[in-house]
Amino acid sequence: MSAEGPPPPAARRGRPGRLQTKTGVASVHGEGSGHAYDVRLKLTKEVLTIQKQDVICASGSGPRANHRTVTLRRQPVGGLGLSIKGGVEHGVPVVISKIFRDLAADQTGMLFVGDALLQVNGINVESATHKEVVHLLKNAGDEVTITVEYLREAPSFLKLPLGSPGPSSQPGSGASSPLFDSGLHLNGASSNTAPSSPSSPVANEPKYEKRWLDALSLPLSMARVSRCRAGADTFRSGAIQVQALDGVSSGPLQFHTAQERADWLRAVSANISDLMLQNVKMANKCCSPCDQVVHMGWVSERLGGAGSSQTFRPRFLALKGSAFYVFVSPPVSPLDWVQAEKTYHLCEVLFKVHKLWLPDDCWAQASLSLGLQDPDGGDHGPFCFSILVGHGGGHVFGVELGNELAAWELSFQRATFRAVQRTGSKTYPCSWQGASLCFTVDFALGFTCFDSKTKGVLWRFKFSQLKGSSDDGKARVKLLFQSLDTKQIEMKELEFQDLTAVLHCIHSFMAAKVASVDPAFMDSQSIAGRYMYSS
């Protein structure tokens, strides 16, 4: 019977990955200004597109809509028909924050919420205070010529509803802002009380529209999505960040609610996972049957010991053939596999899921004792696992979703079972009471100890005869075997240079042996697997 163990998660669940197409709005902090602005997200099978709003010339022969000069005729009722916010004292431009329907600014069809004022009647106001611009506009006479430029990264102080595409709003609409909102729809200091003709564009003048335009496209193949944990003074923790293979990043994408963030995290992760399966299949076309890729993907590795500040770094992990690889960047060609930061033999690696609990709603949660979860932050991740290696070393990795943890656990089992079957046996030099010995773990025969010089067998036991063990945590181990004839317990003591690697090897071979006899038993021991099935 095969020792491969359980099949991959997708095969057992009987359904393919659930690809998602999705659109929505998030906010991003501008690198230069530090102010948040809205972006629209478009998720497809292979790409996450980030769009920003801009004003374009929709018709006519006008130049590209960088600077627009518009003449407003002040009306007896409603004045200029707009309001402004901002000013140099706030560290932001003076921006049109409201345009009132059917009044002067709206009638031009050339002004939009988010337009920054550059000039008023030829006077540069880019470095003016809010009060100075208000005074200038109110005392500019019946005709006011303003030059504006639309801010693609319209600052969040405008307090627009997310996704508002239109240039107009009803008077009194919009939430309040900490920045003063001056209502220039009032008459101001008009020198003529007679009604003036409405402001309107000339027939052959260009017409402008505010639209969402593609600003950044992030290919999802080999991409990484994670929750942003930047400092609270810069970004909130409730964000996700997508980084493409070439290093181009979306920046921290913030959402209105935790549910929105969770939905986007799951949707992007699902598409990345599906593309990763395609990459695995492509990689396996170049590999021999005994050196196939079982699973690979991005994780976050925890750095620093207990009590130190927790830091993380991205790492790309792969299970291939009989080895476990740790990369700084993904292998995209056969030659890249020799560039791994760390490589371990799977027979000598122990995979350990950190403490999970499964409440009634079936959501698994990472253990707070690891220091990887903020008990006050309401965060449900990351989900953590350890890779323990020889000489007591190891790594702590985290993934963002419970189904990712389940996939890693089941894939480790599967890859380890295959590695044991291919390896067949592992022999380690050891000693006892001055004698040089060799200890062999064999998938078919069990445990054998023989003299390293004469090759004479000192003792041999089957896997089923091992009843217990203990070690001193350094080099010495005691193995307790039950005799098939006398049923008595025999204790064998040995010393190894790398005891941890030997113990992990024993664990791997015994787990594979059990799986070859009863695959369902190993499946029942999967903590993360139970989460995946129930959720």
Image: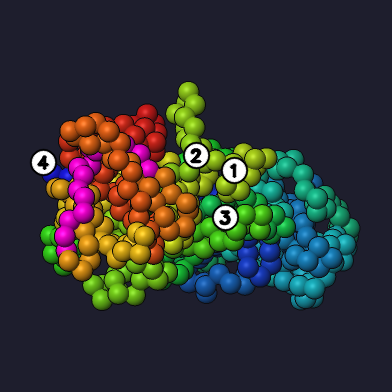
Distance of label 3 from label 1 (alpha carbons)? 21 Å
User: Which circle's residue, 4 or 1, is located before the other in the chain?
Assistant: 4
User: Where's residue 273, x and y in %?
Assistant: 33, 51
Query: Left or right of 38: which side holds 234?
Result: right
Q: From what the image shows, is residue 416 above or below residue 30?
A: above
Spatial CA span between label 3 and label 4: 46 Å
Q: How far separated are the C-alphas under marks 3 and 2?
A: 23 Å
Residue at x 62%, y 39% (from the top left corner): 378
All told, the count of numbered labels is 4
The rendered magenta stretch, by its main secondary structure, is classed as strand
Indicate the quadrant where residue 148 lies: bottom right
Q: Which circle marks residue 369 in the picture?
A: 1
Question: As shown in the figure, which amino acid type bears the numbered disc 4?
Answer: Met
Q: Residue at x 73, y 42 (%)?
A: 175
Which amino acid type is marked by label 3? Cys
First-in-chain label (2 vs 4): 4
Labels 2 & 1 near each other (Cβ < 8 A): yes
Disc 3 designates what residue? 228
Regarding residue 377, the answer to whether it shows in the image is yes
Q: Amino acid at mark 1?
A: Ser
Q: Which residue is mark 4?
A: 1
Q: Which callout, 3 or 2, points at the residue further toward the start of the chain?
A: 3
Q: Which mark is residue 264?
A: none
Q: Quadrant of the N terminus?
A: top left
Please give the range of residues in magenta: 455-469
